[in-house]
């Protein structure tokens, strides 16, 4: 999606002129500032400059303890909440509206990735994907992560358009963590782009707390990685897969 937008902007620039393009960019920054303050606008500017100069990539790591989960299935009596089997996922993937790619469905067969869903009868209303042990960079903004045994990583949340506005995303996440508790998992982590203040605000509302940031840049062709101390203290490590998919801790 981002690539399409950038392509469209480049294609429109000659028609509207450089001045029009600059005005649109400034309008975006003013909107961000009015919604989330000067800090948000400065992060947007720093992100754009850093991306151009050294391919800067920064994300927040957020953490949810099972003790912070207050939602119960009884609060949403019209839905059934449970993990889906690979066979069920294959059936739901036939409907493009469910946003389930074949590659994603195949992950459910490895025993390390699970999909927890809210069902309205036989309709898929919402779901979230969770990984144990480690998560690949393509599902974590370019950062591979290794987690301790008591932590799962939440990396894809989806609510069907017919069910949006019912706060199913938070319910699915909280109830998934409660189900995981029987397997010794008592916390979830997730990641949010450092410029996405709306998502960070939503995470806070759901009970998440910020642990710190992960950062990556490239200077003169050499990669640079950094992890906040609090992230490391919770046992979360950046990993990079080599060409043979072997994982190396950075």
Image: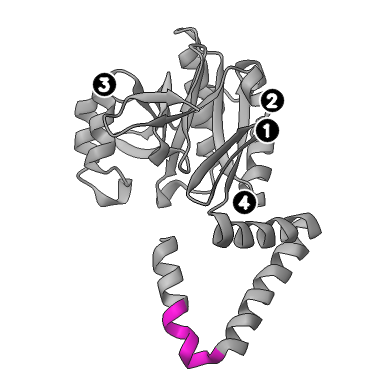
Magenta includes 60? no
Q: Is residue 90 above or below residue 34?
A: above
Q: Nearer the viewer, mark 3 or mark 2?
A: 2
Q: Residue 110, image x and y in percent?
A: 26, 21
CB atoms of marks 4 and 2 within 8 Å: no
Q: Which residue is mark 4?
A: 196
Q: Nearer the viewer, mark 1 or mark 2?
A: 2
Residue drawn at the location 80% of the way across and 60% of the way down: 38
> 54 or 13, which lies in front?
54
**Res 229 quadrant in image:** top right
* View extreme (right): residue: 38
Whether residue 59 is visible: yes
Q: Which residue is mark 3?
A: 110
Q: Which residue is mark 2?
A: 229
CB atoms of marks 1 and 2 within 8 Å: yes
* Comes first in the chain, label 4 or label 2: 4
CB atoms of marks 1 and 3 within 8 Å: no
User: Separation of disc 4 and disc 2 at Cα?
Assistant: 22 Å
Which residues are drawn in magenta?
A: 10-17
Q: Residues within 10 Å of mark 1 (few under 14, many from 20)?
A: some
């Amino acid at each position: 999606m981002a690539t399409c937008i950038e392509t469209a902007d480049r294609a429109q620039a000659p028609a509207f002129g450089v001045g029009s393009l600059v005005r649109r960019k400034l309008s975006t920054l003013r909107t961000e500032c009015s919604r989330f303050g000067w800090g948000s606008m400065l992060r947007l500017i720093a992100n754009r400059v850093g991306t151009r100069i050294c391919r800067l990539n920064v994300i927040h790591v957020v953490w949810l303890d099972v003790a912070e989960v207050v939602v119960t299935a009884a609060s949403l009596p019209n839905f059934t909440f449970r993990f889906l089997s690979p066979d069920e996922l294959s059936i739901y993937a036939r409907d493009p509206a469910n946003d389930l790619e074949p590659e994603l469905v195949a992950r459910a067969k490895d025993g390390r990735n699970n999909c927890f869903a809210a069902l309205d009868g036989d309709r898929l209303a919402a779901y979230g994907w969770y990984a144990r042990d480690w998560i690949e960079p393509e599902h974590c903004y370019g950062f591979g992560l290794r987690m301790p045994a008591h932590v799962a990583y939440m990396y894809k949340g989806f609510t069907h358009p017919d069910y949006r506005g019912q706060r199913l995303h938070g319910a699915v996440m909280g109830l998934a963590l409660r189900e995981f508790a029987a397997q010794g998992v008592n916390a979830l982590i997730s990641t949010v782009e450092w410029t996405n203040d709306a998502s960070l605000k939503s995470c806070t509302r759901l009970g998440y707390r910020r642990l710190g940031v992960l950062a990556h840049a490239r200077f003169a062709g050499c990669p640079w990685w950094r992890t906040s101390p609090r992230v490391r203290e919770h046992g979360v490590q950046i990993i990079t897969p080599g060409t043979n998919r072997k994982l190396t801790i950075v």
